[in-house]
């Protein structure tokens, strides 16, 4: 089974209480459980984590580069500010990273329109709430299957 790190940035531990009109009522634990179920149905092992600390997220990206097959990353506010996370993703290449956001960052404040993650992600899913995580896992599973088919040819 392929292992996927699902990494979550600052304030996502407050989901369910924090601005439910933007982020919904699901808690981070609800999302974690959904990811584990989706991962199991896709043949993926899910390593789900959250931190409010940039350096810890960087360390986890580096750890994933050594032992995971991919990353689903909701870097939250660090998406728009963290060159350290940008550099960690770049250094982890060719590890595929899918960027996820619960809200549509392009329909929000202008400072949220720019992602420092996107230039090195294989794709971005935003605006679909918790469903975005499942979509990201499906996309990675499809990519792993396609990569496996290419290697067998």
Image (tube, rainbow, N blue to C red):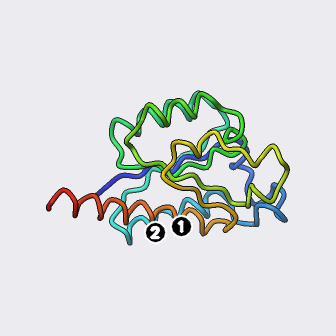
Label 1 environment density (alpha carbons within 10 Å; few <14, some 14–19, many ≥20): some
Task: Please tell me which residue is depicted at 46% across the width and 69% down the height of the picture.
Answer: 38
Task: Please tell me which residue is depicted at 63% across the width and 65% down the height of the picture.
Answer: 130
- The quadrant in which the N terminus is found is bottom left
The quarter holding residue 92 reads top left
Location of mark 2 (residue): 37
The quarter holding residue 85 reads top right
In the rendered view, does 42 fall on the left or right side of 75?
left
The answer to whether the residue labelled 1 contacts the one labelled 2, judged by CB atoms less than 8 Å apart, is: yes
User: In the rendering, at what x and y percent does residue 124 appear?
Assistant: 58, 56
Task: Please tell me which residue is depicted at 55% across the width and 59% down the height of the picture.
Answer: 32
Task: Please tell me which residue is depicted at 81% across the width and 54% down the height of the picture.
Answer: 18
Between 80 and 9, the one lying in front of the other is 80
User: In the rendering, at what x and y percent does residue 42 appear?
Assistant: 37, 69
Label 2 environment density (alpha carbons within 10 Å; few <14, some 14–19, many ≥20): some
7 above or below 104?
above
Mark number displayed over residue 34: 1
In the rendered view, does 29 fall on the left or right side of 94?
right
């Amino acid at each position: 089974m392929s292992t996927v790190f699902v990494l979550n940035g600052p304030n996502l531990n407050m989901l369910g209480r924090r601005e439910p009109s933007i982020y919904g009522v699901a808690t981070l634990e609800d999302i974690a459980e959904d990811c584990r179920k989706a991962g199991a149905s896709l043949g993926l092992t899910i390593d789900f984590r959250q931190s409010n600390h940039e350096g810890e997220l960087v360390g986890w990206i580096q750890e994933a580069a050594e032992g995971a097959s991919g990353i689903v990353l909701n870097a939250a506010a660090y998406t728009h500010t963290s060159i350290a996370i940008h550099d960690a993703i770049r250094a982890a290449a060719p590890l595929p990273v899918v960027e996820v956001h619960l809200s549509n960052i392009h329909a929000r404040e202008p400072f949220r329109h720019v992602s420092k993650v996107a230039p090195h992600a294989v794709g971005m899913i935003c605006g679909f709430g918790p469903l975005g995580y499942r979509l990201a896992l499906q996309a990675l599973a499809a990519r792993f299957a396609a990569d496996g088919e290419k290697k067998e040819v």
